[in-house]
Image (tube, rainbow, N blue to C red):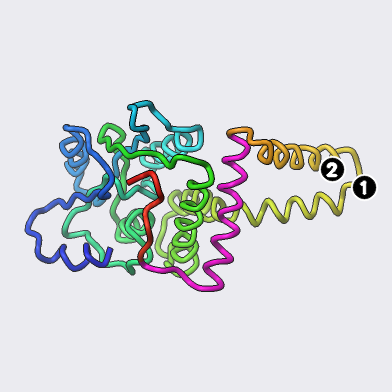
Amino acid sequence: VAAQNFAVPTTGGEILAFSDANATWAPDALRKLVRSFADPQVAYVCGRLRLEAPDGSNREGAYWRFELALRAAESRLHSVTGGNGSIYAVRRADYVDVDPRFGHDLAFPYLMVQRGRRAVYEPEAVAYEKPTPTNETEYRRKVRMFEHCWLITLRGRMLRRLGPVYLVEIVSHRHLRYASGVLHLVLLGTNIALVGEGVVYQVLLGCQLGLLAAAAAGVGIARYYVLVTWATVVSLVNYLRRGVPATWEAAEGTR
């Protein structure tokens, strides 16, 4: 991000498009990415990231499909609350120098909305990346990503000058998502304390323990859910203990 902040003043185009070094764009991606700028209210557009293995097979799991569905709904309702660094564009006049630790993925959408603009999703502008090879590798990647999310959530002034619709989007999709691990721990602790108070609490505790057992046994979606949720807790502890670095290594296997 620091390099982008340095380079943008030297550009002359009206629209600036960005990508990750390990992403490959579809041949028509740029054309489809920029067409949303026909609306003068649109300041930022993110495309769709597809995760494909080297053999060409689609590796988009339930989590990623759900995330993209939320992004599309947010875009229709008002603006997206997050993008991705693999494929996005911004009007040069709306580009904002941000703290390199924040990143553009999470910072640009809400900053555009705070300026009275829109940040939208264009699902037909497609970029491709290799997925992480294992859940454990994905867990380490999520810890690193959530560290930056905690930084911008707690220090990025995300809730200033937002209308009610976008405020609900930010709180529900971002704040509650990042707090999900802590909320799960509170729920589990409270449930254990109340387990003797009735059958309902016993059933709820059984469901929670069943989820943890399924994750420990390697059941796909349960393991992924628990790992990603636990990553929100570990990342918060890391952020509070040592802060967040501005640089990182790409996850092994995604280069």
Quadrant position of residue 157: bottom left
Would residue 105 be found to the left or right of residue 144 on screen? Answer: left
Count of number-bearing discs: 2
Q: Position of residue 23 (x, y in %)?
A: 27, 43
Magenta stretch secondary structure, dominant:
helix
Would residue 157 be found to the left or right of residue 125 on screen? Answer: right
- Identify which residue, 25 or 194, lies in the foreground: 25
Residue 45 in sight in this render: no
Residue beneath disc 1: 196
Residue that extends furthest to the left in the rendered view of this protein = 12
Residue ID at (37%, 26%): 57
Residue ID at (38%, 55%): 106
- Identify which residue, 47 or 61, lies in the foreground: 61
Q: Position of residue 153 (x, y in %)?
A: 48, 63
Residue ID at (55%, 71%): 240
Mark 2 Cα within 10 Å, few/some/many (few <14, many 20+)?
Answer: some
Would residue 170 be found to the left or right of residue 232 on screen? Answer: left
Q: What residue type is labelled 2?
A: Tyr
Q: Is residue 168 above or below residue 66?
A: below
Q: Position of residue 88 (x, y in %)?
A: 26, 47
Query: Which secondary structure, mark 2?
Result: helix
Residue 225 highlighted magenta (yes or no): yes
Would residue 64 be found to the left or right of residue 185 on screen? Answer: left
- Cβ atoms at labels 2 and 1 below 8 Å apart: yes
The residue stretch that appears in magenta: 221-246
Query: Which secondary structure, mark 1?
Result: helix
Residue 5 in sight in this render: yes
Q: What residue type is labelled 1?
A: Gly
Residue 4 highlighted magenta (yes or no): no
Q: Position of residue 83 (x, y in %)?
A: 35, 48
Residue beneath disc 2: 201
For the N terminus, give its image quadrant. Answer: bottom left
